[in-house]
């Protein structure tokens, strides 16, 4: 496979590939222990209590909505990929179809992400992701 360089987005995953990543991680009940952005707000990452890091590549949208109870644990209660994103729905199909909209139930809130790919790697609790992950 030719080198795409750092500015070229990775190919979009199929919904089945995306769901396979989530199923393999057993996300239900895993707590979010750290989160952050890298590469100029291009990629978002979550470190989970189960030892995995989720990297959301080429994010177009990310939002977390929660109550004012900041003591609420941030455990993942579920996730789904079949809820349409108002932002994505407003874009032309040739753009909209390049992204997935994933919704995570995190504690009493919802984390909404529109991205091209998701990768899972072992979490590094002592540092932020490097250029490779």
Image (spheres, rainbow, N blue to C red):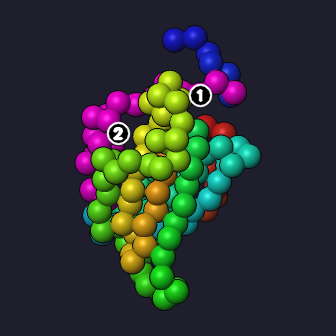
Q: Quadrant of residue 109?
A: bottom left
Other-residue count near label 2 (Cα within 10 Å), few / some / many at <14 / 14–19 / ≥20: some
Q: Where residue 38 sits: x, y (%)?
A: 67, 49
Q: Is residue 63 above or below residue 81?
A: below
Q: Which residue is mark 1?
A: 9
Q: Which residue is mark 2?
A: 18
Q: Position of residue 5 (x, y in %)?
A: 67, 22
Q: What count of labels does the image hold?
A: 2
- Closer to the N terminus: mark 2 or mark 1? 1
**Callout 1 environment at 10 Å: few (<14), some (14 to 19), or many (20+)?**
few
* Residue 17 among those drawn in magenta: yes
Q: Residue at x 52, y 47 (%)?
A: 87
Return the x and y of residue 20 as percentages of the image width and height: 28, 40
Nearer to me, 51 or 75: 75
Disc number for residue 17: none
The answer to whether 44 is drawn above or below residue 98 in the figure is: below
The residue segment tinted magenta is: 7-27
Residue 6 in view here: yes
Label 2: element kind: helix
Residue 125: quadrant of the picture: bottom right
Left or right: 15 as drawn, with respect to 52:
left
Question: Which one is nearer the viewer's eye here, 97 or 38?
Answer: 97
């Amino acid at each position: 496979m030719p080198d795409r360089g750092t500015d070229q987005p990775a190919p979009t995953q199929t919904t089945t590939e995306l769901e396979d990543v989530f199923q393999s991680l057993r996300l239900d009940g895993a707590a979010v222990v750290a989160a952050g952005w890298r590469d100029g707000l291009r990629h978002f990452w979550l470190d989970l209590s189960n030892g995995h890091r989720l990297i959301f590549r080429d994010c177009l949208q990310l939002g977390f909505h929660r109550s004012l109870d900041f003591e609420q644990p941030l455990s993942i209660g579920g996730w789904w990929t079949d809820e349409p994103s108002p932002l994505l729905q407003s874009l032309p199909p040739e753009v909209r179809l390049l992204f997935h909209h994933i919704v995570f139930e995190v504690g009493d809130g919802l984390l909404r992400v529109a991205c091209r790919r998701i990768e899972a790697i072992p979490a590094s609790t002592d540092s932020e992701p490097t250029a490779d992950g």
